[in-house]
């Protein structure tokens, strides 16, 4: 019985120390209008720099954001966090355009690619599992585009789910 007690004590101490560590990096997936993959570097326990490579409007955008996390719902310990942040993005968008009304060589479609730059905001709720290094979240990421296929564009409906692996 003594060996089992010590083994149980070692396992409990090991899992407690593992869950108490804060992870410095995370990679993840995001769904929504701006769906893609992300990489996060936590330069402080509650602040990070996030890079998001996303696809939107048949193009690709790279977004860099600075985010801050705050624990919520003290009843559940430190599993739930709200986060918010700001950032910038750049990339390209593509759309099909018709050769109309006067096609040069017959009627047809072609792709027009345009560069965009813009600003982003983000806010959301994240759940971090204490026993394994994963998190799940819901985020709202409005954006503002300059140039592209329209001179100005305001996107207010970019909601997404996230899944991240922390290491």
Image (cartoon, rainbow, N blue to C red):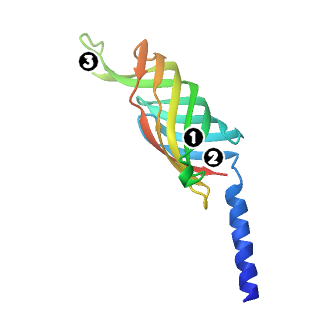
User: Nearer the N terminus, badge 3 or badge 1?
Assistant: 1
The 10 Å Cα crowd at callout 1, few under 14, some 14 to 19, many 20 or more, is many
The 10 Å Cα crowd at callout 2, few under 14, some 14 to 19, many 20 or more, is many
Mark identifier at residue 26: 2
Can you give x and y, in whole percent of width and height, for residue 159 in the image?
Answer: 42, 36
**In the displayed structure, does residue 152 sit left or right of residue 5?**
left
Q: Is residue 166 above or below residue 68?
A: below
Marks 2 and 3, how far apart at CA: 51 Å
Name the residue beneath numbered marker 3.
Answer: 106
Name the residue beneath numbered marker 1.
Answer: 38
Q: Is mark 1 on a helix, strand or loop?
A: strand
Contact (CB < 8 A) between labels 2 and 1?
Answer: yes
**In the displayed structure, does residue 117 sit left or right of residue 14?**
left
Q: In this view, does 116 lie above or below 80?
A: above
Task: Please tell me which residue lies in front, 134 or 3.
Answer: 3
Marks 2 and 1, how far apart at CA: 8 Å
The 10 Å Cα crowd at callout 3, few under 14, some 14 to 19, many 20 or more, is few
Contact (CB < 8 A) between labels 3 and 1?
Answer: no
Can you give x and y, in whole percent of width and height, for residue 97 in the image?
Answer: 33, 20
Q: Is mark 2 on a helix, strand or loop?
A: strand
Task: Please tell me which residue lies in front, 38 or 78.
Answer: 78
């Amino acid at each position: 019985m003594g060996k089992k007690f010590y083994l149980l004590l070692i396992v409990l101490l090991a899992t407690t120390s593992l869950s108490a560590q804060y992870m410095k990096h995370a990679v993840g997936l995001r769904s929504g209008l701006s769906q893609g993959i992300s990489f996060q570097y936590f330069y402080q326990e509650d602040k990070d720099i996030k890079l998001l490579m996303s696809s939107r409007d048949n193009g690709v955008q790279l977004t860099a954001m600075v985010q801050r996390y705050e624990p919520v719902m003290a009843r559940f310990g430190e599993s739930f966090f709200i986060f918010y942040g700001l950032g910038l993005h750049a990339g390209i968008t593509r759309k099909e355009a018709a050769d109309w009304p006067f096609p040069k060589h017959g009627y047809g479609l072609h792709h027009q690619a345009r560069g965009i730059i813009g600003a982003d905001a983000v806010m959301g709720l994240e759940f971090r599992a204490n026993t394994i290094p994963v998190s799940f979240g819901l985020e709202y990421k409005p954006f503002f585009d300059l140039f592209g296929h329209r001179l100005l564009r305001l996107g207010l409906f970019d909601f997404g789910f996230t899944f991240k692996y922390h290491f």
